[in-house]
Image (tube, rainbow, N blue to C red):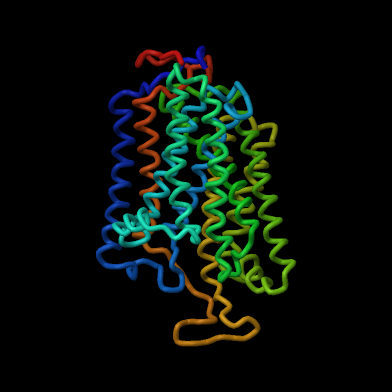
């Protein structure tokens, strides 16, 4: 990377701090929502003792899964030797760290009693997948942080490929662990599948690439220039491959469930009779998050354009949120089979389909995590040389400041 020139974001004071103020206001609203639920209790949200993971968990798990995939571009460059992606590798690493920070911030705020995290970090039950994920998340920060240092420091470039390989392997393990949180929950019929580990890995590739594309295109525009058309089209094709793979894994997962007779009830609920959940599955995850982006990316008119790629990436993100909503909340809405083969009823709502409607504080808490992610990326763009001149359209006017730094 010695011949690659990177520079910091050159946006002026008002153009830089204006969006930051808006993001800060959204982050403040998220913090206020956290305080409100913390003081009054989670009963003020749409969650109850049946649906214990609500909308904030949807946002949090989506960001945690996408954090792994946001490192795709850096991994393709360092691990698979694709030189055309190397200029964007530092930005890919920063986006990955920022996305994980946003997801974990939501998770910590949504669990209630965040001070109990000290207990979780000092007392471990190694039979619990949740305890193992504590190591996976902290290890990801450490490994990707070192990898970013090697990418930005010229003296350490010789070790960047090895650090990139370590980050690549670690992120596969991390996302498998996140998917296994659900796959190991045998009490929930919608989960209870070893396929959820690799399925979440494929989902991460699609969601993370989509978020990175949005950030890369927005950063170039914020800098007053445009990402190179050829590179944009190449990244769009990469997104299309991952989106198609995500659709494939979704089909395999549900066909596997339908093959087992005892899962027919929950599959019918998710796919056909569950009200909002089939709507979000077919219209959100499959159509808007899968089919439409593939049509856009493979269309001769829109596939290689910046607007087309940006629209496809945004739809993949929306489809990913719909997928997480169906996966996390839909599975809890379906009653647990306490006595298989029998019907249950009690004053504790056993055997009943559970209703859930997210509250306003839950929305702000989830969106606050996205705001934190965007703030971290924005500050990173301003203080670190992350924007490569070699990836900018030659017709774009060069910025007047700051000066370029060879890397």
Residue drawn at x 53%, y 80% is: 352
Residue 19 against residue 326 in the figure, above or below: above
Q: Is residue 386 above or below residue 180?
A: above
Residue positioned 59% across, 51% down in the render: 200
Q: Position of residue 126 (x, y in %)?
A: 48, 58
Tell me: 317 left or right of 297.
left
Asked whether 404 or 117 is in front, the reply is 117
The answer to whether residue 281 is left or right of residue 70 is: right
Q: Residue 342 appears in which quarter of the rendering? A: bottom right
| Front in this rendered view, residue 105 or 241 | 105
x then y, percent, for residue 164: 54, 31
Q: Position of residue 270 (x, y in %)?
A: 61, 66
Q: How many numbered marks appear?
A: 0
Residue 244 sits in quarter? top right
Q: Is residue 354 above or below residue 330?
A: below
Residue 309: x, y in percent? 58, 35
Give the residue furthest to the left. 39
Q: Residue at x 57, y 44 (%)?
A: 172
Q: In the figure, is residue 49 to the left or right of 239?
A: left
Residue sitting at 58 percent across and 54 percent down?
A: 284
């Amino acid at each position: 990377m010695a011949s690659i020139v990177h520079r910091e974001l050159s946006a002026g004071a008002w153009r830089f701090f204006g969006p930051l103020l808006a993001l800060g206001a959204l982050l403040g609203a998220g913090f206020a929502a956290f305080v409100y639920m913390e003081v009054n209790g989670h009963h003020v949200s749409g969650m109850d003792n049946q649906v214990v993971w609500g909308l904030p968990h949807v946002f949090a798990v989506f960001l945690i899964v996408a954090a792994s995939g946001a490192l795709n571009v850096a991994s393709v460059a360092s691990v698979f030797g694709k030189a055309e992606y190397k200029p964007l590798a530092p930005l890919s690493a920063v986006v990955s760290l920022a996305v994980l920070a946003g997801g974990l911030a939501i998770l910590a705020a949504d669990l209630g009693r965040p001070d109990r995290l000290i207990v979780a970090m000092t007392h471990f039950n190694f039979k619990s997948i949740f305890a193992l994920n504590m190591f996976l998340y902290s290890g990801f920060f450490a490994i990707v942080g070192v990898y970013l240092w090697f990418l930005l420091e010229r003296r350490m470039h010789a070790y960047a490929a090895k650090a990139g390989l370590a980050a690549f392997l670690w992120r596969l393990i991390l996302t498998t662990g996140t998917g296994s949180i659900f796959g190991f929950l045998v009490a929930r019929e919608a989960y209870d599948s070893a396929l959820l580990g690799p399925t979440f890995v494929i989902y991460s590739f699609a969601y993370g690439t989509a978020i990175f594309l949005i950030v890369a295109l927005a950063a170039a525009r914020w800098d007053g220039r445009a990402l190179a058309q050829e590179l944009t089209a190449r990244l769009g094709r990469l997104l299309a491959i991952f989106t198609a793979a995500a659709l494939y894994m979704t089909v395999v997962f549900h066909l596997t469930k339908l093959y087992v007779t005892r899962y027919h009830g929950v599959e019918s609920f998710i796919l056909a009779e569950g009200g909002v959940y089939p709507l979000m599955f077919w219209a959100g995850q499959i159509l808007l998050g899968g089919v439409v982006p593939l049509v856009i990316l493979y269309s001769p008119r829109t596939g290689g354009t910046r607007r087309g790629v940006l629209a496809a990436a945004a739809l993949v993100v929306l489809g990913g949120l719909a997928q997480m909503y169906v996966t996390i909340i839909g599975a809890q809405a379906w009653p647990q089979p306490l006595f298989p083969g029998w019907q249950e009823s009690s004053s504790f709502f056993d055997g009943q389909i559970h209703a859930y409607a997210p509250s306003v504080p839950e929305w702000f808490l989830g969106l606050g995590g996205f705001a934190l992610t965007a703030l971290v990326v924005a500050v990173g763009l301003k203080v670190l040389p992350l924007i490569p001149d070699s990836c900018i359209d030659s017709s774009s006017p060069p910025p007047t400041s700051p000066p370029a730094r060879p890397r």
